[in-house]
Image (cartoon, coloured by chain):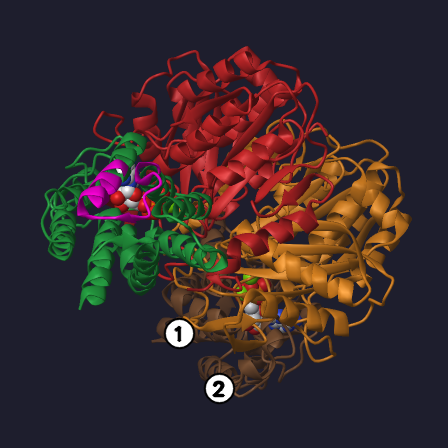
Chain colours: A brown, B green, C red, D orange
Amino acid sequence: MMLDVSVLAGWIERLTGSIEREQEHLTELDAAIGDGDHGANMARGFKAVREKIAQGKSETPADLFKLVAMTLISTVGGASGPLYGTFFLEASKAAGDARALDLASLHTVLAAGLAGVRMRGKAVPGDKTMVDALTPAVDALVGDGDLRKALEAAAVAAADGAEQTRPLVAHKGRASYLGERAIGHKDPGAASSVLLFASLAQEVAELEA
Amino acid sequence: MMLDVSVLAGWIERLTGSIEREQEHLTELDAAIGDGDHGANMARGFKAVREKIAQGKSETPADLFKLVAMTLISTVGGASGPLYGTFFLEASKAAGDARALDLASLHTVLAAGLAGVRMRGKAVPGDKTMVDALTPAVDALVGDGDLRKALEAAAVAAADGAEQTRPLVAHKGRASYLGERAIGHKDPGAASSVLLFASLAQEVAELEA
Amino acid sequence: MKKFINSPEDVVTDALEGMAIAHADLLKVCREPDYIMRADGPVRGKVALVSGGGSGHEPLHGGFVGRGMLDAACPGAVFTSPTPDQILAATRAVDGGAGVLHIVKNYTGDVMNFEMAAELMQAEGVDVRQVIIDDDVAVKDSLYTAGRRGVAGTVLAERICGGAAEAGADLETLTALCTEVNAGTRSMGIALTPCTVPHAGKPSFALAEDEMEFGIGIHGEPGRARVKLEPADRVAEMLMEPILEDLPFSAGDEILLFVNGMGGTPLLELYILYRKAYEIAQQHGLKVSRHLVGSYTTSLEMAGASITLLRLTGAMRQAWDAPVLTPALRWGA
Amino acid sequence: MKKFINSPEDVVTDALEGMAIAHADLLKVCREPDYIMRADGPVRGKVALVSGGGSGHEPLHGGFVGRGMLDAACPGAVFTSPTPDQILAATRAVDGGAGVLHIVKNYTGDVMNFEMAAELMQAEGVDVRQVIIDDDVAVKDSLYTAGRRGVAGTVLAERICGGAAEAGADLETLTALCTEVNAGTRSMGIALTPCTVPHAGKPSFALAEDEMEFGIGIHGEPGRARVKLEPADRVAEMLMEPILEDLPFSAGDEILLFVNGMGGTPLLELYILYRKAYEIAQQHGLKVSRHLVGSYTTSLEMAGASITLLRLTGAMRQAWDAPVLTPALRWGA
Ligand SMILES: Nc1ncnc2c1ncn2[C@@H]1O[C@H](COP(=O)(O)OP(=O)(O)O)[C@@H](O)[C@H]1O
Ligand SMILES: Nc1ncnc2c1ncn2[C@@H]1O[C@H](COP(=O)(O)OP(=O)(O)O)[C@@H](O)[C@H]1O
Ligand SMILES: [Mg+2]
Ligand SMILES: [Mg+2]
Ligand SMILES: [Mg+2]
Ligand SMILES: [Mg+2]
């Protein structure tokens, strides 16, 4: 199976739904070690994305990702806005004029997105940020195996990565102000990154089923 | 027994003590239908009275009452300050240069005090104010019976009067803002007036015992 | 009770000392008896304006002492009117020979204490007039109550009379102006939370998570009714309705619209209320030509707000716009 | 959650509309993207000052737009930094041809969003400089954190740079001045209660009746430590200690002392803190020559306070004293 723009739009729609469902949970995580707005930020951004996607058809994955990027950048704010915005913006650039993505190109595209996040936020794995979920998830896409299996592995890797932020002290973002007091709490941005990969895996699984 | 200035000073000291003990209770009553300061107001005033009395000896009941009056006026504030201040000021005027008071002159003196309160505050019995306790108490001093018994009756009358403010709607003071919502609550100023008479009755009872 | 205080006994004097240090350029804090006066007072030939009342309403009144507003303010204990000796001392200190106007909020205690002081000042040969402010429409004025309370409208009276006094108005004129301002002012307040009087140590009433106290005064006293929580726009309507019903506004009138915070409500929410109050005023044909938004007449840390409307005359507008230089209200200087 | 709001989604826009109506003489509120600009902007030939940040800190930043302070402010959602398109639009709108200074509080989100906007503006050929404010001593600055937060000191930077910009300082000078102000500013905050972000609907943390949250920022986030309730004088000491330890004040220095309320703390209590803070400053040989007392950088309805010290130079004092005409800070005009 190839990920063309309609499959990818289905992913974004599914992601929007799961962010809405998880909004309160994301906010709770952020209230514990941040400022309690991550759920609202993400929900506001993806609600706008849904409206934008409904308004006009994107021709290519790159078009779609650019639309998502620009919408997130102009509606989310906070730390997560520029970061997820950059993720999709760099993904868009890497997608070029491909009409559809296979596993290898998906990896390239999302790796570019991750690189953008790391460049913009200067976080490395272990800093207790979304990078801790995104990095193992993108890494799980390496290879030329089955797309669906790879995506399932990526979703699991993201969830593991997010889980592993719990014992960490944060070195970036608001949670870093707390020092040791951040220990024991999952990073909210890592939790939203899990939704990104989980929704993609689900979308593909349902389409293939 | 005659009430000379030292007996009367004993009364004021006893009254001060009972106001201190009842401070919280008076405040609670005032919080329910006023602004929650009656206990603090009275305690502040009588603490100052105690200091003033300690500083210099009054020659006559009139001197003592004037000292109490001026101290209350300049330290209590609120509604109760001018009212109790006027009570003692008018009592002082009525006491003239008597060296001591018997029951009849005590009645005259305290009736003058009550008249002062009614003139200053324009309240009549039934308005749910201190006047509802002061009036029956002063009335109980009419006659030429036993001082101690008369004072006990006055204390009981004051307590009854205060109790009878409960079912009333207030027509004066802050409680009047509440309309029907004041029903069921005892008037704080009536409660402090009870202390006035109860402490005088106790003082005399102990001295006679 | 959670407050930045040292002890209930010291609240007022500690805060007075803080004010004295912070605003030494504008005002002088005199102690025992306590009052706050203009640093440059008494002003010869000017009518002096004296107000006062219980503490806990800051910046009312001490924060309004200065050029173009009050000459002196007498702070009582928290929510307790000041005593006659304070009022006497303040009146004497700022009397500039042209008479003194006492601006008194309508509470039994305040009125009686100011009255006692005025009686004594008159005996000293100083011409003292008293204007009672009673702008609160929550209380039905009747023979059977202590009358309407003086609330946030007091700020407007102090400012407008202060502006006019600075411009040279005489005692007669100022007394009439103050009376006119009061007659044209209506206020209504609502609380989301109670407040805690330091001495009492406990909240003045208890409200459930979905309740508001409607028709409150400024002393943490329970209000006219307990109602369910409503959206801000509905709250603005609930406050505007009794104000507009109660006289003296009619289409075409020019008004000053004042949204006041009770101490614990952030500015953000006050602007939300202002938006709707303005809209309602407009729907009634009123022309909002002046405004005030902020926590100017407070009840300690109470979360709540009040709305005040004042029907403006040209003279009032002119006095409002004149320079004012106080810790809490300042423009043109 | 008890607030005067219509819905969590509408908080910022409703309040912006209220501000627009109330302060139409001073500022213009532009929508989608949202920003607030001086009514008389852009000012030709003057360096424009643009700031912004999450809403919920009112009057910061929108209440400081006007002559002698900011040219524009970009309000984000509550506690969420604004987006690059807002910053871009505001920057374009107030650019008077002499360059634009972005004053940015040091939060990852704020810094990244302003950075993205600045990159785009530079591409349009507009000279944009960015100064990061990080005055909060509660956070240890280290390679392993996002660095110190920008808190109440931001007001001082905006005012001083605004005064200097109005007097004609160029972009180079203003960038240096702002950097110098930030370098000489230290703040520390404490909370008695949490606050509730409208979207979250629940308090940001839970505090017992006898606890304070020490070393808080301005977003309702938990602080450096949870401590027992203390009297106001001790609280002032607790706030002053880390400020004075942390550089750059030494005996003989002239300072500005700023006691800031977090939104739910009444003025009365701020003056009590000011009193002690002033005393401590004096004991350290510091000369308090300017002051600010009030709720200028808030965390919604949080009860709490912060203390800020700024080491003043002559140029800073002069810029501070110059006329300022904004909704929340006004003098000399
Ligand atoms: N420098 C950074 N690099 C990568 N991710 C970051 C960085 N700073 C913050 N984040 C992520 O952003 C999340 C917080 O997003 P959000 O709450 O929406 O923004 P804000 O912190 O501005 O309120 C954090 O949980 C973290 O995963
Ligand atoms: N006009 C009045 N005449 C007589 N007593 C009054 C009047 N107004 C108030 N009081 C008394 O004063 C009491 C309240 O006193 P206090 O709480 O000290 O003053 P304030 O009401 O100013 O806070 C009331 O309970 C009532 O008994
Ligand atoms: Mg957040
Ligand atoms: Mg009372
Ligand atoms: Mg009182
Ligand atoms: Mg945020």
- Expressed as whole percent of the image width and height from the top left, the position of residue B16 reads 34, 59
Across and down, in percent, residue D131 comes to 78, 57
Q: Amino acid at mark 2?
A: Asp
Foreground tag (1 vs 2): 2
Q: Quadrant of ligand 5?
A: top left
Could you say which disc has been placed on residue C329 in the image? none
Q: How many marks?
A: 2
Residue A187 falls left or right of residue B197 = right
Tag of residue A160: 2
Residue of label 1: A202
Q: Is residue D124 left or right of residue C43?
A: right
Q: Is residue D100 magenta?
A: no
Q: Secondary structure at mark 1?
A: helix
Whether residue D322 is visible here, answered yes or no, is yes
- In the image, residue A10 above or below residue D138: above
| Front-most of residues C141 and D59 | C141
Calculate the distance from the C-alpha at mark 1 to the C-alpha at mark 2.
Answer: 17 Å
Look at the image and tell me in which quarter the C terminus of chain D lies. Answer: top right
Looking at the picture, tell me which residue is in the foreground, A86 or B35.
Answer: B35
Q: Position of residue C315 (x, y in %)?
A: 56, 12
Crowding near the residue tagged with mark 2, few <14, some 14–19, many ≥20 C-alpha atoms within 10 Å: some
Q: Main structural element of the magenta stretch: helix, strand or loop? A: helix
User: Residue drawn 29% across and 49% down?
Assistant: B100
Magenta-drawn segment: B93-112
Q: Chain of mark 1?
A: A
Please, is residue D232 above or below residue C304 in the view?
below
Find numbered disc 2 in the image and state the secondary structure of the residue it sits on: helix
